[in-house]
Amino acid sequence: MTLLRKNNWARALLFVSTALTLAAQETRAQLPEPQKHPEAAPATVTRKPNIVLMLMDNLGYGELGIYGGGILRGAPTPRIDKLASEGTRLLNFNVEAQCTPSRSALMTGRFPIRSGTYQVPRGGVPEGLTTWEITLAQLLSAQGYATGIWGKWHLGSAEARLPTNRGFDEWYGIPRTYSEVFWPSLNDTHSLWPSVGAKQGWDPRLVPAEPIYEARKGEKPRMVAELNSDRRRGMEKEITTRAIEFIKRTAHSGKPFFAYVSFSLFHMPTLPNPEFAGRTGNGDWADCLAEMDYRTGQILDAIKEAGVEDNTVVIFPSFAWRKRSTPRDSSRRGTSATTDGRSRAPGRRSPASS
């Protein structure tokens, strides 16, 4: 993944985005095959680059070692720091302040207010990305890419608006938010919260627990589990394992691919996998930081092992949403405040060879 000149990045991205949009939306006449001259040199075949998009959830740019965090936040981040040193760092990467609008802008390249996705939806109301929007996955699919997403979608929980109906070939994850993991665990109470007997009042018959889906294009999504705290702890490992399998399988087939790895960290509840619990000695949050760096490294290793490292664009952005009680620290993530970390998040790109 050799470094392109930074001042070409914005220009190249605009060119690629425009080209993909025109290719997907225009109807082109079939051109006759040009006659080959017997002495003509063979044309150079340009391979379409693979794209791996690792989206972090609620990660402020000041959490990483490359930006002064890392060990000062409880755990070093060597794999992410190395990725940042090899690619283009976006130091003023301004994002939306919530999950749904951030993901909408990412998938469409448009202001979320144009798509009805300007805030996280509340339960019981119609929600999701409008069906006439064209997603990045749809554009790439039209160009012959294999597409996959693992993790949170948050752009519609009705079947027609799930990822496999919006351009993705396969998906494993949740349709809405990890906040719903609290619902089952709050059913019983021995605290001062309002309750009837020993119950808080959550009734799964009225408001079901959030499903974890497995889906493929053209098939009905299959619910594989309900989201609870135990499943929450294992999501990062499951997301990574499935993404790696897709990368290796698709690379072996020779087909270009778009892998959208929608990581769960650091969305609340911030719970590390049992393999990482207690590893840093600095609490759950630091353990999650160590796990995040490790999972990122696993994805990068898989790209190399698949033999497509020199033809793969790796993008590592985030957005910030969680609230903090330390407003003096402007580089951390946060919301309900004017901290820099609320709307400015890590953004880095490690480009394929030109």
Image (cartoon, grey):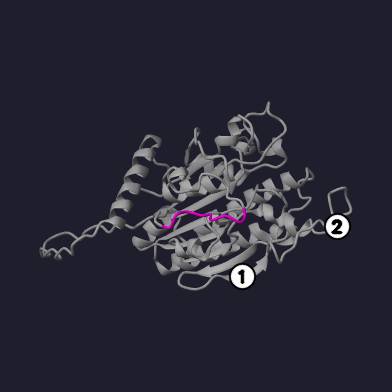
The x, y position of residue 300, in whole percent, is 54, 54
Taking the view exactly as shown, the residue that stands out farthest to the top is 328
Q: CA distance from mark 1 to mark 2?
A: 31 Å
Which span is picked out in magenta?
Answer: 123-131
Residue 129 sits inside the magenta stretch: yes
The x, y position of residue 266, in whole percent, is 65, 47
The x, y position of residue 94, in whole percent, is 50, 36
| Quarter-of-image position of residue 24 | bottom left
Task: Name the residue beneath numbered marker 2.
Answer: 196
Q: Could you tell me which secondary element the residue under label 2 belongs to?
A: loop
The amino acid pointed to by label 1 is Met
Dot 2, crowdedness within 10 Å: few (<14), some or many (≥20)?
few
Q: Which of the pair 38/295 is nearer the observer?
A: 295
* Number of on-image labels: 2
Q: Earlier in the sequence, mark 1 or mark 2?
A: 2
Q: Please report the residue visible at 16 percent of the width from the left and 63 percent of the height from the top.
A: 31
